[in-house]
Amino acid sequence: ATQMTQSPSSLSASVGDRVTITCRASQGIRNELGWLQQKPGKAPKLLIYAASSLQSGVPSRFSGSGSGTDFTLTISSLQPEDFATYYCLQDYNYPRTFGQGTKVEIK
Amino acid sequence: DVQLLESGGALVQPGGSLRLSCAASGSTFTNFAMSWVRQAPGKGLEWVSGISGSGDNTYYADSVKGRFTISRDKSNNMVYLQMDSLRVEDTAIYYCTKDRSPWEVGLIPFDIWGQGTKVTVSS
């Protein structure tokens, strides 16, 4: 199975900060990676697909980059509603695999 | 708008069985691959199983292989997860979500999720 290593596992940041989360795949997965946001008690929400494409309705402060094995999710200016847990997910092959998650907390 | 609605979650004893259902409404899901994803209490997301649009191809995580069976009823826009030989560690919220098959280039996967159904395995 393709292992997804996500870092950091948690971070504290202030409103307005630039935040970067990374994900590394154990093998090349082209650009077949998504980023999801999850808030407590809610289903995950897709933010980015195909590594860098912004899902419809998602604010432009979210962006994704990378290809092959190394990927990044960036929030350019953190907003109060962005405090949540973020996951990467590869859809290159089966079994699908998630990163361990990054909890973004208020500093 | 397309919506997914899971049902069938319950409290079940270890070794027991349960069938989860995922109903798609608002559009036809006949040709979409689908997946089940779970989240144990306080833990991260774990992909469980997937099925192609035709239903001919099924996929499983090692943790459930041989115990869970995914299927679909295309005529009724339903996807099922039959869970047998349940273990305490299967306790989780189970979500169904739209996926894509490898040949579906350009299709956006994981953009639609249900609200989840809770499975508790305990004696």
Image (tube, coloured by chain):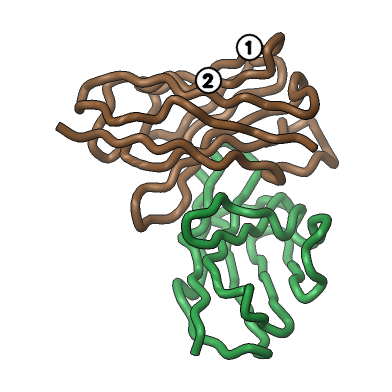
Chain for mark 2?
A: B
User: Where is residue A54 shown, x and y percent of the image?
Assistant: 81, 61
Count of numbered tags:
2
The hue in which chain B appears in the rendered picture of the protein: brown
Where, by quadrant of the figure, is residue A25 drawn?
Answer: bottom right
Of B30 and A28, the residue lying toward us: B30
Q: Are marks 1 and 2 in contact (CB under 8 Å)?
A: yes
Neighbourhood count class around disc 2 (C-alpha, 10 Å): few under 14, some 14–19, many 20 upward: many
Residue identifier under label 1:
B73
Relative side of B114 to A61, left or right: left
Residue B46 position (above or below residue A46): above
Return the disc, 1 or 2, that comes first in the chain's sequence.
Answer: 1
Left or right position of B48 against A56: left
Q: Which residue in the structure is indicated by mark 2?
A: B80
Residue type pointed to by label 2: Tyr
Give the green chain's letter.
A
Up/down of B49 relative to A5, above or below = above
| Residue shown at 71% from the left, 42% from the top | B109
Indicate left or right for B69 with A31 as reference: left
